[in-house]
Image (cartoon, helix red, strand yellow):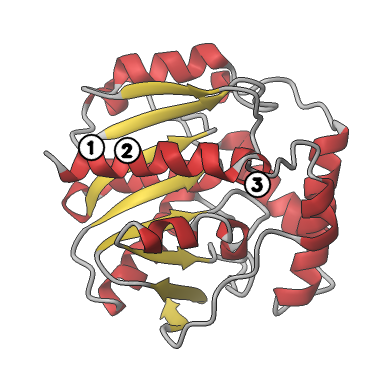
Amino acid sequence: METHDDDLKNFEAHGAAPLQVTSDQGYVEHDGARIWYASYGAGAPVILLHGGLGHGGNWGYQIPALISSGYRAVVIDSRGHGRSTRDSRPYTYELMASDIVAVMDVLHLQKAAFVGWSDGACIALVLASKTPDRVDGVFFFGCNMDPSGTKEFVFTPVVERCFSRHSKDYAELSATPDAFQAFVDAVSLMMGTEPNYTAEDLAAIRVPVTIVQSEHDEFIKPEHAEYLARSIPGAALITLPGVSHFAPLQRPKLFNNAVLAFLKGINQR
């Protein structure tokens, strides 16, 4: 039986499962930043994009499932997150999306499937919109594409535990370990002003997309997920029962099964 961490007490204390050791990791210099990446396994590439304030290590429960299913899993620390650095410019999803393309170029990945969580989902959909020739499909989990999609913020105990873990990880991994509050402020500014995709923008997306909403998501309105699925041509919509915005940590098997079903579907096209 799968161990649940619905209250994130284990995540707060220990983080996600440790990343496996790999020699295929490093940094890509791009547009004023050093972007960290790591690659695991072989097969069709799947790029995992973490949420805001997090880092690639938050995917520790997903990488083994992807490897054992025959995929190459690539994690990337978004600009200014985790081990990656940034310059003084404001965060934008488009800028972070361009960093992903730079990593793909270094790894000689012409195309990849994307699994995006929260901010990472937005980055993945920006890639689908701006560089569709690099995207096999997008698993879009727990994110909005315009400001109307978010709920009023409530600092619940679960959110507080996740925030606490992010603070510890930032101090351990970042090149600017004492700048966590400035980091939070800068990312929050982006979240409060972006993205601003219209229905027409969404209708122009032509890659396979699955919109994934948790039953108890703390941040995203379920009706917004339904709107995204209606607006993106051919998009599917699934709801993960019993979990919240932190499903990859709370019930990894549930989340991983949904990811693998999505990947199987796009690979059968």
Q: Residue at x 47, y 20 (%)?
A: 225
Labels 1 & 3 near each other (Cβ < 8 A): no
| Mark 3 crowd level (few <14, some 14–19, many ≥20, 10 Å Cα) | many
Residue 132 is left or right of residue 148, and the answer is left
Element under label 2?
A: helix
The single residue placed furthest to the bottom in the displayed view is: 23
- Residue kind at label 2, given as amino acid type: Phe
Residue 138 is situated, as x and y percent measured from the top left of the image, at 33, 41
Task: Work out whether residue 56 or residue 98 is closer to the camera in this orientation and state it.
Answer: 56
Residue 190 is situated, as x and y percent measured from the top left of the image, at 60, 44
Residue assigned mark 2: 262
Which disc number belongs to residue 154?
Answer: none
Res. 45 image quadrant: bottom left
The quadrant in which the N terminus is found is top right
Disc 1 from disc 3: Cα separation:
24 Å
Residue assigned mark 3: 249
Asked if one can make out residue 129 in the rendered structure from this viewpoint, the answer is yes
Task: Work out whether residue 49 or residue 102 is closer to the camera in this orientation and state it.
Answer: 49
